[in-house]
Amino acid sequence: MKIKKTTSASGKIIKNFFLVILTFIVILTLFSSLYSGQQAPKQITLNDLANDINNQQVKSISVSGNTVDAVLKDNSNVETQKEVETSLSDTLKNYGVDPKTLSQIPLEIVNESGWKYWAGILIPTLVPLILIGAFFWWTFRQAKAGANQAFSFGKSNIKLFSSFKDRATFADVAGLKEAKQELMEVVDFLKNPKKYLDLGAQIPRGVLLLGQPGTGKTLLARAVAGEAGVPFFHISASEFVEMFVGVGASRTRDAFSTAKRAAPAILFIDEIDAVGRERGAGVGGGHDEREQTLNQILVEMDGFEKDAQVIVLAATNRPDILDPALLRPGRFDRRVVLDLPDINDREAILKIHGRNKPLSKEVDLRQIAVRTPGFSGADLENLMNEGAIMAASKGQKEILQNDLYQSIEKVLLGPERRSRTLSKKEKEITAYHEAGHALVSASLKHADPVHKISVIARGQAGGYTLKLPLEDIHLKTRKQFMADLAVAFGGYSTEEIVFKDLSTGASNDLQIASDVARKMITRYGMGEKFGPITFGKTQELVFLGKEISTEKNYSEETALEIDREVEKLVKRAYDAAKKIITQRRKTLDEIAGTLMEKETIEKEEFDAMIKKSGIKPVEI
């Protein structure tokens, strides 16, 4: 990276050099054109001038210093030099010119101190000197900047929080009650250390924020900065590492020393997994630059004096690859886990992101929260933004409920692709396929309810059935897995029954069903034959990234039995889906026909169809 900067600096010097030369050439050309535009006067002697005056051939005379310019009757210009320290009249008189004749010719004395005189002398002399001086000034300035860069490699690019454009506090962070409580204790410790120290409590060395991408780790750190009345320094872990050996460790020392000088203070390191990966798993043994930087972080955290009021706040979504030495007590004493928001938190997050948006009175954010299980805070922010964009594109003054519904599907699946036209046959197959998924889901007790069915292509999907749980699910039972398997086979079995043929539209469903069935047997202990036992040892390898490999720790005979158990689960789910489609063919035809006509069926209309058909959910 620094090599590129050096190369760009050299290129800038060369560019400036050529700029100076070009400017010099332009100025010379300008002056030469000005001077060349005037015809040079003819040089004559004083004798010739005296003869022309006596012969009455001179029209006018001008004197500038010792230079005499004369305009003849034929409008030609002549020039000569008079005697030094002698007037022109005396000089011409000595050459036999009659004073009466000379008095009849207009005579002009030009002041030698005029700006043209000095410009004619100074500009050709000073301009080249000024340009050359400017060039050397630019050259030395670039060289100085390069030297400063060379000596600033070891300085960290640490930033002191004063006020972000969008100042955040804990009131701007919805949910995460436990996380905010932990961090509020840290802020209170820094503001009022005495009440903790009097009871023998020691300040925590480090707080690690753990959570999936988009759960609000950086936002929570910004909220800490907004709440704390102490200096708050922030830096990304990737800024420590450079291509030069030792620079990362030097920058680490500089960042920590800066925070110590400002104590009590908070040092926030974002994406600490960039340098905190487990040692010995990368390239270069224990001497590569990243590992040296990690070693320096470990030393600095251990090197804090007992009364040093500095807290290291770090964030990562990859806690599984962090070095154990970084996580031991005494370094990161607290680990704050940020979970995905539940339905109440999602509603609160939607309200926060909808504060500055003109929402229609009909908008029910609770219904949006119901349809967004598994959404992170960043997903919900994106959802509200997409809803605003969609409303603006339609020329609306307010954001409607349907705009937010559409934005949910856009975030989940991608934008609509209405330009992807299907033939009549393909549209019929897609309609029956999605109707099969929806019908099987509505017929099973432990399946998620259907919220929407559509045959409009979105993203990579030619059609989709939107199924969402009524409440947040943290554990999943065997019956729920079996219901998911049967729903996955709903489209496959429908195509087989209705068209007596199969298409490639069910390929993704089959892959998902096979993976779920195998995990039920090998990982979750849900097989009928093997019972509570897992198969295969999963190892997470950190080598140029993260790789997951599964070690086969069972015999070939057991592998055959596992395959048979997986096949049994898949066959059971397939038979259940096929039975539902066969028994409720009339309802299937009604759903598919509505889909071909309207292309989309919402939850209310679908529920009315199911209720009219008298469908009662069953278990498998």
Image (tube, rainbow, N blue to C red):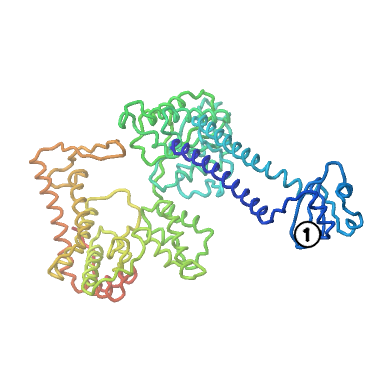
Q: Amino acid at mark 1?
A: Leu
Report the quarter where the C terminus lies: bottom left
**Above/below status of 16 relative to 449:** above
Residue 281: image x %, image y %? 30, 31
Q: Taking 611 as reference, is 252 left or right?
A: right
Q: Is residue 539 visible?
A: yes
Is residue 204 in view from this perspective?
no
Q: Which of the pair 16/249 is nearer the observer?
A: 16
Q: Position of residue 295 (x, y in %)?
A: 40, 26
Q: Nearer the viewer, residue 419 or 212?
A: 419
Query: Does residue 134 appear to the left or right of 7 in the view shown?
Result: right
Q: How many numbered discs sit on the rendered protein?
A: 1
The residue drawn where x is 46% and y is 63% is 389
Q: Which SS class for mark 1?
A: strand
Drawn side of residue 617 relative to residue 13, left or right: left
Q: Residue at x 20, y 39 (%)?
A: 550
Residue 599 in which image quadrant: bottom left
Image quadrant in which the N terminus is located: top left
Decide which of 307, 72 is in the foreground and name it. Answer: 72
Residue carrying label 1: 72
- Farthest residue, direction right: 100
Q: Residue at position x 87%, y 51% from top?
A: 96
Viewer-proximal residue among 526 and 494: 494
Return the x and y of residue 20 as percentages of the image width and height.
58, 44
Image spot of residue 512 (x, y percent): 22, 54
- Vertical side of 424 occupied by 228: above or below: above
